[in-house]
Amino acid sequence: MKFERLIIGLAAISTAVVAAIPIASAQVYPSRPINIVVPFPAGGATDIAARILAERMRASLGQPVVVENISGAGGTIAVARVARAAPDGYVLSLGDLTSHVSSSAIFPIQYDVMSDLEPVAMLASGPQLFAGRSTIPAKDLAELIDWLKTQPNQASLALPGTLGSGGHISGLAFQDVAGVRFRFVPYRGGAPAIQDLVAGHVDLLFVGASAALPYVRSGQIKAFGVTTESRWAAAPDIPTISESGVSLYFSLWQGLWAPKNTPKNVIEKLNAAVVDALADAALRQRFADFGQEIPPRAQQTPEALGAHHRAEIGKWWPIIKAAGIKVE
């Protein structure tokens, strides 16, 4: 009788162990490659940041981290792909203010950019530079505003990239706070917009500060201000826009998200990998080389990204919608 009970007991233990194996295996994350979906073509600032980050996250996660570029519709096609993905941490969305804020107010979408994504971490940010052609008849921002007020809708502002890009939103906001009006001239990206500004084919441009700075230093274009709250460390001689009494702050920031309902332990593991990557001195230098600043550790949490994302939507959606921007 004792022998039979022993056999039954061992059988029960064996069954429990076997049954637990799939559960234990399911909890191991990651066990296969992770895809980071970037909503723009390869070669841009967001794509470069994603590839630098993916390379460093691989060391922490022990699995390949693959960057997948899906462009179109202001980044909303890529965001939709992640919003519909399985919430298991293997398909992530890396994007910026254009893809995760402004485009949702312009393009028709089938997802909620806030509730259908789980924030993982804030990655980096960089200022914009407000620049003008070298021959523009103004030596500072105050004189530029006076000049613009004398000829409403006559001056031109280059629009780099898609509708709702940082340059577009900054231009819309500047019109409101400065009480001026200009024409928007669309370009495929920042590089051709800068080239036409250098050539004098357009008057003004809001663009990533690091991309425009070499042309300012060479005297090919004029710098009227940066969109940071305090002066930019890379060019402390250039004043902020607010120093001229115009309240305009704008950051070209980037974040990382997972699909809604991704398990908390997976979000925590991804966040830890990002935090570890952002602490790496070599990565920080590579980000700095193309004008990106890493946020303080306290701002690298999922909660911090979620709060910042909500605040940016609350700040920029009313301006975008008031402009009546339509997709043609």
Image (cartoon, rainbow, N blue to C red):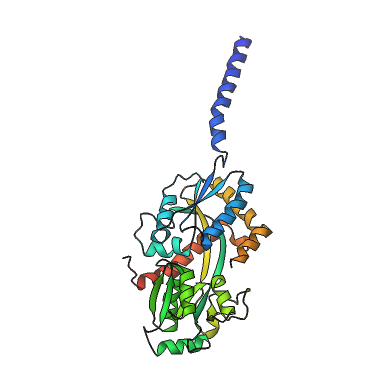
Task: Determine the residue located farthest toward the top in the rendered image.
Answer: 1
Q: Position of residue 286 (x, y in %)?
A: 63, 61
Which residue: 64% across, 58% down? 283
The residue nearer to you, when weighing 99 against 245, is 99
Q: Is residue 52 visible?
A: yes
State whether residue 10 is above or below residue 221: above
Q: Which residue is drawn at the image coordinates 46% and 81% (left, top)?
A: 200
Along the line of sight, which residue is nearer the eye, 80 or 7?
A: 80
The answer to whether residue 295 shows anywhere in this view is no
In this figure, what is the number of numbered marks?
0
**Direction front: furthest residue:** 199
| Left or right: 289, with 310 as reference point | right
Q: Position of residue 304 (x, y in %)?
A: 55, 60
Residue 275 at what x, y percent from top left?
A: 62, 55
Q: Is residue 177 left or right of residue 232?
A: left
Residue 281: quadrant of the picture? bottom right
